[in-house]
Image (cartoon, grey):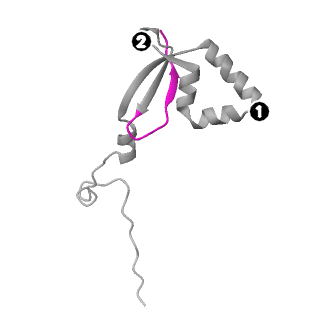
Amino acid sequence: MNKVAYESPSLTPTTDSASKYNIPCMPHLDAIEESTIKSIEPYKLRIWGEVLFWVLAICTGGLYYLIDHWFLFLHLLLRYKRVPGSEAKMLVIKTMYFTDITIQDIIN
């Protein structure tokens, strides 16, 4: 039985093998979809809303904290107020395909 040595192609193509491995490089589709920003909304923290949030979280034994974590619109409704961009302390960034929101501190 004749044994044939298998030659694996090198990862760095040479000039004569460059045409063999001409593979186009494209970004992953998820990266493109997640980078599409749908909206950016400015918000400011409400002090009374923050106090009420922690009172509810403590009185319910953490249940309200869990619900607030699951339903992010409640998080925004109680703790933040929508304001003009010049007054904003937080930005809510929504992407087209990602339903979560990101709250980031901004520096004025």
The magenta span reads: 95-108
Circle 1: is it few (<14), some (14-19), or many (20+) Cα within 10 Å? few
Instruction: Report which quarter residue 80 is drawn in.
Output: top right
- Position of residue 39 measured from the top left corner of the image (x, y, whole percent): 38, 28
- Position of residue 12 measured from the top left corner of the image (x, y, whole percent): 35, 53
Seen at 42% across and 83% down, the residue is 3
* Measured Cα–Cα span from mark 2 to mark 1: 35 Å
**Helix, strand or loop under label 1:** loop
**Helix, strand or loop under label 2:** loop
**Mark 1 sits on what residue?**
61
Q: Residue 32: within the magenta?
A: no
Q: Residue 106: within the magenta?
A: yes
* Main SS of residues in magenta: loop
N-term-proximal mark, 2 vs 1:
1
What amino acid does circle 1 point to?
Gly
Disc number placed over residue 84 in the picture, else none: 2
- The answer to whether residue 28 is visible is no
What amino acid does circle 2 point to?
Pro
On screen, 33 above or below 84?
A: below
From the viewer's side, name the closer residue of 88 and 13: 88
Seen at 63% across and 36% down, the residue is 67
From the viewer's side, name the closer residue of 22 and 54: 54
- Position of residue 101 measured from the top left corner of the image (x, y, whole percent): 49, 31
Seen at 28% across and 58% down, the residue is 21
- The answer to whether residue 82 is visible is yes
- Position of residue 26 measured from the top left corner of the image (x, y, whole percent): 31, 47
From the viewer's side, name the closer residue of 104 and 52: 52
86 relative to 65 in the view: left or right: left
